[in-house]
Image (cartoon, rainbow, N blue to C red):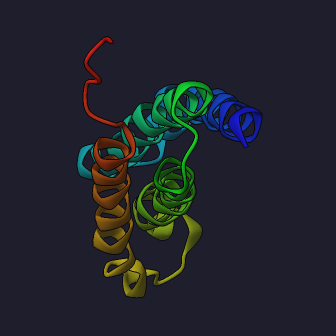
Amino acid sequence: MQTTFIKLGAGFAMAAVILGAFGAHALEKILNPDQLATYEIGVRYQFYHALGLILIGLLQNHFPNRKLSNAGWLFVTGITFFSGSLYLLALQEALGMDLSWLGPITPIGGSLLIIGWFLILLGIPGDQKEK
């Protein structure tokens, strides 16, 4: 599972760089400042949590447990819900679609990311005294 989260993290990070560049160069002419800010929040949180996925993969080498694995899958789902909904909400006008129904998906994704961080906290055992 360790390599799965490292690879997923690298993929999400790569996509965040691509989406960020696309936002900075192509969308800057299409989106208003508020829409662009929403899009950029999606990119930023995607990148943070892509790095978090890589961290989870590395941590699993030292502390293999279900909590870290669950944190990884929560990050994958949270990135998809949180950042994905922000991308679509920012682009809805440009796409000519009413995607306002996605609004409630964003905080669900954010909650999954928060729970993922909490599981990382729980998934790392306390200090062991040397014998």
In the rendered image, residue 100, in percent from the top left (x then y), is placed at: 37, 82
Camera sees residue 12: yes
Q: Is residue 101 above or below residue 110?
A: below
- Residue 20, compared with residue 36, is above or below; it is above
Q: Residue at x 33, y 78 (%)?
A: 103
For the N terminus, the quadrant is top right
State which quadrant residue 57 falls in: top right
Q: Residue furthest top?
A: 130
How many numbered marks have been drawn onto this rendered protein structure? 0
Above-or-below relation of 8 to 69 = above
The spot of residue 63 in percent (x, y) is: 51, 34
Instruction: State left or right for residue 12 relative to residue 30.
Output: right
Residue at x 57%, y 58% (from the top left corner): 73
**In this rendering, position of residue 35 left or right of residue 89:** left
| Nearer the observer, 10 or 36 | 10
Picture coordinates of residue 49 (x, y %)?
A: 44, 39
Q: Position of residue 5 (x, y in %)?
A: 66, 39
Nearer to us in this view, 90 or 41: 41
Residue at (40, 47) in percent of width and height: 42
> Is residue 36 something one can see in this rendering?
no
Residue shown at 33%/12% (left/top)?
A: 131
Q: Nearer the viewer, residue 20 or 45?
A: 45
What residue occupies the far front of the structure in this picture? Answer: 131
